[in-house]
């Protein structure tokens, strides 16, 4: 049965307009992006098969062009559109962050960091550099490692803070494994960086871990000392 033959309140587009985008499943959102299906399959059917084939929405968005285009009905044009949509969302969160007060909108901070690091296949250590009023000065990925670790050099972090002229920082790294738990090494590194930056009057506001669809805050968990 074609989607146009479904009850109006079950069609993805109409459902989005009446109930909001957050009411849609991953397959329904993807079906709106696809617009049409292929012979014998609706856009919803195709979306479900794509998600099943790649394993998750994250894996689909992170797929290489060659992998994506092997799937029946997909091609370079769809790949480009999907990547453009992903980049638009990243830039939206980037703009939202620059307009937000960090302390007044921690959710915006988490959304931005999630969009920046969630799709990374290797562990990345990054930093939000802030002025003394906690406005964004810059965001940079400082170190890239392996699947489960990234070497971080405090001396280079301090030099970057001085170069940018930051008065405060928020550290962030991802866990490709999907674990939100801070390791003992994560905690010790944060303590070392906090002590080092304290010597030059730069405050560490938080350290966040991005894993899967979630972001864990050291500050919220009482792990900052």
Image (tube, grey):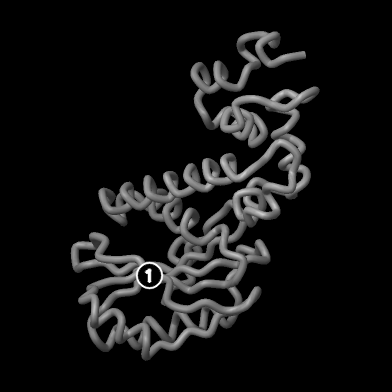
Image quadrant where one finds the C terminus: bottom left
Q: Position of residue 181 (x, y in %)?
A: 61, 67
**Quadrant in the picture for residue 219:** bottom left
Residue at left offset 69%, top offset 26%: 37
**Mark 1 Cα-neighbour bin, 10 Å: few <14, some 14–19, many ≥20:** few
Q: Position of residue 35 (x, y in %)?
A: 60, 26
Q: How many marks on residues?
A: 1
Q: Nearer the viewer, residue 186 or 144?
A: 144
The single residue placed furthest to the bottom in the displayed view is 155
Which residue is labeled 1 in the image?
A: 140
Residue at left offset 55%, top offset 80%: 150
Q: For the residue labelled by badge 1, is the local secondary structure a helix, a strand or a loop? A: strand
Instruction: Locate residue 212 relative to residue 163 in the image: left or right.
Output: right
Compared to residue 22, the image places residue 69 above or below, namely below
Compared to residue 152, the image places residue 138 above or below, namely above
Instruction: Locate residue 84 relative to residue 109 in the image: left or right.
Output: right
Image quadrant where one finds the N terminus: top right
Q: Position of residue 19 (x, y in %)?
A: 52, 20
**Quadrant in the picture for residue 162:** bottom left
The single residue placed furthest to the front in the displayed view is 76
Q: Nearer the viewer, residue 112 or 218?
A: 112
Residue at left offset 32%, top offset 85%: 158
Residue at left offset 46%, top offset 61%: 220
Q: Position of residue 223 (x, y in %)?
A: 48, 71
Q: Nearer the viewer, residue 153 or 141?
A: 141
């Amino acid at each position: 049965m074609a989607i146009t033959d479904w009850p109006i309140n079950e069609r993805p587009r109409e459902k989005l307009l009446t109930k909001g985008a957050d009411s849609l499943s991953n397959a329904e959102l993807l079906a709106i992006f696809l617009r049409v299906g292929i012979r014998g399959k609706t856009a919803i059917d195709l979306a479900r098969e794509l998600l099943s084939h790649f394993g998750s929405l994250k894996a689909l968005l992170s797929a290489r062009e060659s992998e994506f285009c092997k799937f029946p009905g997909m091609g370079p044009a769809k790949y480009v559109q999907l990547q453009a949509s992903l980049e638009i969302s990243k830039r939206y969160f980037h703009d939202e962050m620059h307009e937000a007060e960090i302390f007044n909108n921690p959710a915006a901070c988490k959304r931005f960091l999630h969009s920046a690091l969630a799709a990374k296949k290797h562990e990345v250590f990054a930093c939000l550099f802030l002025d003394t009023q906690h406005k964004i000065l810059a965001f940079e990925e400082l170190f890239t490692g392996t699947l489960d670790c990234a070497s971080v050099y405090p001396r280079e972090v301090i030099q970057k803070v001085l170069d940018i002229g930051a008065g405060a920082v928020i550290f962030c790294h991802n866990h490709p494994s999907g674990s939100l738990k801070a390791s003992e090494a994560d905690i010790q590194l944060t303590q070392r960086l906090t002590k080092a930056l304290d010597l030059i009057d730069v405050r560490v506001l938080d350290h966040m871990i991005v894993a899967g669809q979630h972001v864990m805050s050291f500050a919220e968990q009482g792990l900052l000392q």
